[in-house]
Image: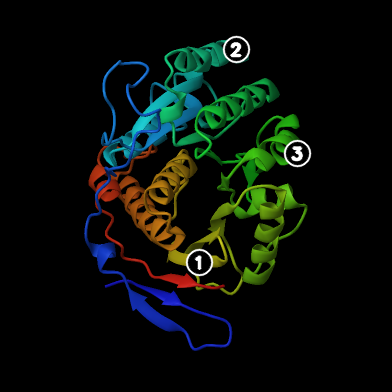
Amino acid sequence: MPAIVRRRPGKTPERSTYASFCLPRPTHRRRLARVTRGTCPSTARRCENVPVTTTILSIQSSVAYGHVGNSAAVFPLQRLGVEVWPVYTVHFSNHTGYGAWRGPLLAAEDVHDVIVGVEEREAMPEIDAVLSGYQGGTQIGDVILDAVARVKAANPAAIYACDPVMGNAASGCFVHPDIPVLLRDKVVPKADLITPNQFELGFLTRTEPTDLDSTLASVDQAREMGPSTVLVTSVLRPDRPEGTVEMLAVHGDGAWIVQTPHLPMKANGSGDVTAALFTAHLLETGDAALSLARTASSMFDLLNTTLDSGRRELQIVQSQDYYAHPRMQFEVTQVR
């Protein structure tokens, strides 16, 4: 059974296994509906002690062919039992990595209108999280921040989970030059959870994270900007075993790392799925270590299934059981 290594300063690492890691946890939490006692405003019915599933407003891109943005994130979340309300920022034929695509980049005003329409249904109190990823322009960033403000006004317990997509160590920045600055100066300070890779973390904090200590220091700087939780999705320590990659989660006073095999592939959309799964698991459990273990397990099996298929696009549907029932095959180590 996979274990979490509990490490405390000045103490010998202590192993503790979670039986729940090998047992499916209920994805439907029973909780009080977040509305005034009496009647639900949109349905005029009694709603005390109504079972309510986690609800995520996901503002991301969409493609007809393949899986990136909402086209990558929505189905895995639904397979976990999450209610997802997708708002599209583009609707392309395919992702831009192919070099050619067709379809509209939706105007910021149109995206805003969709969100206002949801608000007019008096549905904002139901939202547990706003999730955003790639931002194609600064105006969309403003629309997302406005949506976050509207959701939090209706439900102060809601969180904003931001995947600050801007680039990676191999390619550098691949977004419009205004986007990284927008993310650093305006968007990330409003987020509760961010999911950068190591390269993006460095830009956000004006640091150069390399080893574990410097990465933790960079995360601490990122948390001082606003987010309380940081998931670093691709940690490449120089002293890691060859052929591995790591993810690091920092939440509350703790920090945890997980190591998985590095698969020889490029997988557009994998970051979108990672951010979605970790957000959903953290909302459900409040446990960053468990959320990290589940996410790492599901993501490795999704990527491995995709690699075995020989296909370029993520095998999102074919891997669905790995989201609902993670195998929990990787050890999570507490490093702080």
Whole-angstrom CA distance, mark 3 to mark 2, is 23 Å
Badge 3 or badge 2: first in the primary sequence? 2
Is residue 111 shown to the viewer in this render? yes
Q: Secondary structure at mark 1?
A: strand
Labels 1 and 3 touching (C-beta < 8 A): no
Q: In the displayed structure, does residue 93 sit left or right of residue 143?
A: left
Q: Residue 144: image x %, image y %?
A: 59, 26
Label 3's element? helix
Residue type highlighted by circle 1: Trp
N-terminal of the pair, mark 2 or mark 1, is 2
Label 3 neighbourhood size at 10 Å, few (<14), some (14-19), many (20+)?
Answer: few
Measured from the top left, where is residue 320 in percent x and y? Answer: 26, 42
Which residue is label 1 attached to? Answer: 256
Specify how the rendered protein is coloured: rainbow
The residue labelled by disc 2 is 107
Q: Quadrant of residue 66?
A: top left
Q: CB atoms at circles 3 and 2 under 8 Å apart?
A: no
Number of other residues with Cα within 10 Å of mark 2, as a class: few under 14, some 14 to 19, many 20 or more: some
For this rendering, which residue is in front, 170 or 333? 333
Front disc: 2 or 1: 1
Dot 1: within a 10 Å radius of its alpha carbon, few (fewer than 14), some, or many (20 or more) residues? many
Q: Which residue matches tag 3?
A: 185
- Quarter where residue 313 is shown: top left
Amino acid found under the numbered disc labelled 3: Asp
Q: Residue at x 50, y 66 (%)?
A: 257
Task: Tell me where residue 295 appears, x and y as whole percent.
Answer: 39, 53
Residue closer to the observer: 57 or 196: 57
Q: Secondary structure at mark 2?
A: loop
